[in-house]
Image: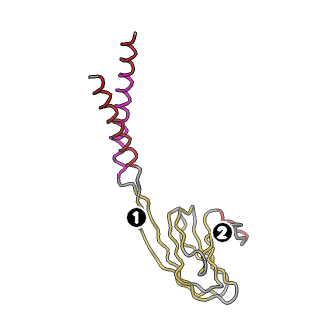
Amino acid sequence: MGRALWAITATLLAVSLALIIFSNFSEYQLVSSAELSAVVSETTLFKISNETGIFKIRLIEAPKDVSLILLAGRDYEKYAMNKSIPAAPLILKSDGKREVFGLFKDELAILAKPYLNGGLIQVEISRYVQRFPYAFLSVPGYFLFIVSLGIVLCLVKSRLESRE
C-alpha cells in the first residue's frame, strides 16, 4: 500500500506541475493593423499610440536617406520637451533593420528623419494583445499540487513514526 500511495502521489505531483506549466502558455492575437504612408522632406513626428501595448512596426518602403526612429515612454517625453534623440534608439532603415516587435510603454511615436532629400515612407503598424487561453488550468493544477504535497507530508510523517 505504501509504494502505491507514493506512486499515486508522484503522479499527482507531475500532473499538477504539467497543468501549472501549460496554463502559462500564451499567444499573441492581432487587434488592429494600419498602414502609414507619408511624404517626408524634413524631420516629422508621427504619434502612433498613447498607451502601453505590444506592437509590430514593419518598414515597407523608405528612401535610403530616411531613418525611422521609434520613441516610446521617456524617450518620447524627452523628445517632446527638448527635441533630443535618445543615445541608443531603435532605428528602422531600408538598408538595415526593417521590423520591430515588442512592448512599448506609455506612448509610441515614429520620428522620420531624412538626411538629404526625403521621400515617401510606408510603415505597417500592428497592435497585438497577449492572451492566456489555458489560464483556467492553473486552478486545478494548484489544487492538485497542494493536495499532493499534503499527501507527501502525511506519508513522510507516517514513515518517520514507523521507524520509532
The residue at the point 59 percent across, 71 percent down is 109
In the rendered structure, find residue 71 and report the number of the disc placed on it: none
Q: Any mark on residue 89, and which?
A: 2
Q: Is residue 51 left or right of residue 133?
A: right
| Residue named by callout 1 | 29
Image quadrant occupied by the C terminus? top left
- Residue range (magenta): 134-155
Q: How far apart, in angstroms, are the residues tagged by discs 1 and 2?
A: 27 Å
Give, as a three-letter code, the residue at label 2: Pro
36 shown above or below 102: below
Q: Nearer the viewer, residue 157 or 159?
A: 159
The spot of residue 106 in percent (x, y) is 57, 62
Q: Amino acid type of disc 1?
A: Gln
Quick one: label 2, few (<14), some, or many (20+) residues within 10 Å?
A: few
Seen in the picture, residue 148 relative to 63 is either above or below; the reply is above
**View extreme (top): residue:** 164
Q: Residue furthest left?
A: 1
Q: Quadrant of the N terminus?
A: top left
